[in-house]
Structure formats: structure tokens, C-alpha cells
Amino acid sequence: MPIVVQKYGGSSVADLPRIRRIAEEVVARKRAGYDVAVVVSAMGKTTDQLLALARELSASPPRRELDMMLSTGERVTMALLSIAIHELGEEAISFTGSQAGITTNDRHADARIIEVRPFRVQDELARGRVVIVAGFQGVSYKREVTTLGRGGSDTTAVALAAALGAEACEIYSDVDGVYSADPRVVSAARHLPEISYAEMQEMAQAGAKVMNAQAVEFAKQAGIAIYARASFQPGRETVIRKGAPVEEYTPRAVVSSKNIVRVRMIGQASSARLAEVLALVERHQIPLREVSFASPPSTPAWSRASFLIPMENAVNYPRFREELSALLGAAVELDEHLGAVSVIGEGIMRDEKVLLASLVRAERLGVPLEGLSTTAFRISLLVPLGDVERLVRDLHAALIEVHEPVVAGGGVRLQEEGGGER
């Protein structure tokens, strides 16, 4: 029988009535002629609650112990869902990440999957059982329990789908797919029926919560289409796949990432000193973005080395900050109240139009620009945290809402409202 992998997020399994409803959906798919493997997140806000407990004891809990604790949330969900499926007359069995054959590298709190050997999953599917797998977790080659970071259950699902040769990977949450902005921030956000791997990966890396960036990377490598759907509102969906129609050279989305820290080494920051700092980063397993180092002929007292820390997975940041200050003293500056607003779209850096428009809009709003970075698919503006949402709304209005997508010739063109194509 064809295999389908489904993933249900924390809001979908937040309480027992919802778990029963999910069990009914899973059983219906099984009885429709599919082998079904289900990946689950922890119930509701369980992960946040467990993390809060640890932080009542320590500002920087040991990451290994956090993984041991946080991995229990998904185990509760997987067992409850398995029980609910049994009550509906189908056989089910639950597996932890390690039991499902998910091997990761040796990092805690933001590990990466390096291999999936789903032999036990395959055996149980062959016996006609539904297999429930705890998302967000695996086991390192040192046999240590590891977790995959925020959104890691998405990665579990896609990696498992690839290893099983599944027909589809379906990601269920409280939203019916991917939007051009967070609908809670931008009321005019547009639903995107299809999106390419590259654009979705850039959106995820820039802060979009609907999909995990590593999950998209796995899907791209394996050529698996991801279907992002709402758990309890059948109808619309977003398909993330190769060959999705592209609105060429045009912004597709405006997303944001909050709570970013910028570390700047001021004065004469040598490459050797930067290496010392990066060794400290590695010791505390702090996630990094956009490391920059410049060595001009003159050496004025301005920042010559910098990097960004997205705080979402930086669980050891307080201890890191303390040791960094001890190492560099007055030669380091920490900007701890920043956010990033990113414009996403294929080819948007092929000319300067979108970049210029973004800068002009920020200036007109009076939003100070703290930094700027670009890729072929993304323009990111680093701004004060308090300005993030109003800049998202303004850029979405200026760069996306003024255009109407038009499907033509097998692709997607953009037509300006009241004007011609461009």
C-alpha cells in the first residue's frame, strides 16, 4: 500500500478531544487504503511550560538535561494518540525518535538529523499498524537523546517520509497553509497555494513559523512535496514542491524574526580573536547568522567583526553573554533588542528596485536601519524590535498588496492593479 506521513502540531493535539479527532482522521486515512505514519508534537504549550520549569532553577540549564526533559512532551502525545486509535478499532504503536531510527549529530537543543533507519517503522507498517512517532527528537551517534529545535517535528516528518519513500508528507497545524505575511500581523496577507522549496526555505530561515527550514531542505533533497494544511478546516492548502509557479523577480512574502541579538567586536578585532569568540559560541552551542569580518588598511574604532544570534534556540545565552564579556570586556557591544524584517521572492536582487523601495519605506516610517543583508531570494532589514510589525505591514502594503497575481502561459505573472503587466 502507498505510505503517507502526517505531522500534527501542538495546537492540533492540545487536549484529549482534539487527540480523538486526530485519531479519527488517521483511522479514516488508514481505511482508505494507506499505510500511515504519524509524527506528533507535544500537546499545546507543553514545551514552553517545561522550559519555564527548568529556568526557574537555572538561567542557563545544561542543554543535555533540557533535551532529556523536553523530549518527554512528544512521548506523552504519541502514547495518547496510539491509545485513541486503538479505541477506534485499529492497531497502532508509538515510537520515540530513537526507536524510529532517527540519528542526529552531537548537538543539544538544535541537533540536525544525519540519518534515518526506519526498520522498526517499516516492520510495523507491514503488520498493518499505524505508527506514531515522537517528533522533535532523535539520538546522537553517542547514544544521547537530542532535540531538533523549534519546529523540529516538521523535520522529523519530512526526514521520515524520505526514508520510507512516502507518497506524500502532510503537515497539519492551526493555519491552512503559507501566507504572504503572518495573518495575525497583516490582515491583507494572501494565501499562497503553491511555493517553491527555495522561497519556502528563505521564508522559514527569516522567521516564518509555518514551516521549519531544515524540513524544507530535506524535502528538496528527496524531491518530496509537502502539503501544509489546517487540522480542522479542510479546504485550502499550500503545496511546497519543485516546479511551483514563480512570480518572477517579484516579492512573494514579508516575514519577520524577533528577538535577535547582534554581537559586535569593536576596535581592532583580529581574526584570531574572532576565532576565540566562535570557539566560545561552539562551546555553548549558540546558533549564529551572518558572521561578518572586515580588515581595512586603517583601524578606526568601529566594528570590524559581528554576527547575529536568533534567540529562539539560544538557551545558554545568559552564560555565553557572561563569558563573552569576561573575554572581551569593553571590546564587545551587544544589541539585544533587534528584529529582522525580510522581503522574500525569487530573483528580487536581480536589480535594485525592491531593495531601494524597502529602504525608502523604512526611512519614510522613521525606522532606523541597524543592518542589511541580502541573498538571491531575500532582503533583510535589521531594525529595532519595537518597529518590526509596523514595518512588516508597510512593506507588505507597498510591495505585495499593490500587485495582483495573474496565471498565464503555465506560469505566474504580476499585473499592477489598474495597469499592465510587468
Image (spheres, rainbow, N blue to C red):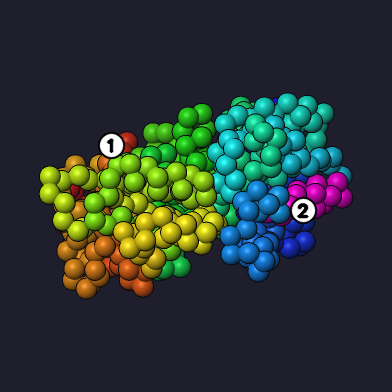
Residue 133, percent from left and from top? 71, 42
Query: SS class of the residue under badge 2?
Result: helix
The disc placed on residue 76 is 2
Q: Nearer the viewer, residue 233 or 305?
A: 305
Q: Residues within 10 Å of mark 1 (few under 14, many from 20)?
A: few
Kind of residue at disc 2: Val
Mark in the foreground, 1 or 2: 2
Left or right of residue 275: residue 294: left
Q: Quadrant of the N terminus?
A: top right
Sequence-earlier tag: 1 or 2:
2
Q: Which residues are magenta?
A: 70-87
Judge whether residue 306 can be spotted in this image.
Answer: yes
Residue 279, percent from left and from top? 44, 43
Q: Residue at x 19, y 58 (%)?
A: 301
Residue 166, by quadrant, is top right
Residue 105, percent from left and from top? 58, 35
Kind of residue at disc 1: Gly
Q: Residue at x 43, y 63 (%)?
A: 259
Residue 153 is covered by the magenta coloring: no
Residue 76 is covered by the magenta coloring: yes
Query: SS class of the residue under badge 1?
Result: loop
Residue 135, by quadrant, is top right
Q: Nearer the viewer, residue 116 or 19?
A: 116
Q: Residue at x 73, y 26 (%)?
A: 119
Q: Main secondary structure of the magenta part?
A: helix
Q: Residue at x 64, y 61 (%)?
A: 51
Judge whether residue 345 can be spotted in this image.
Answer: no
- Reading the image, the residue beneath label 1 is 409
Q: Is residue 422 above or below residue 389?
A: above
The disc placed on residue 304 is none
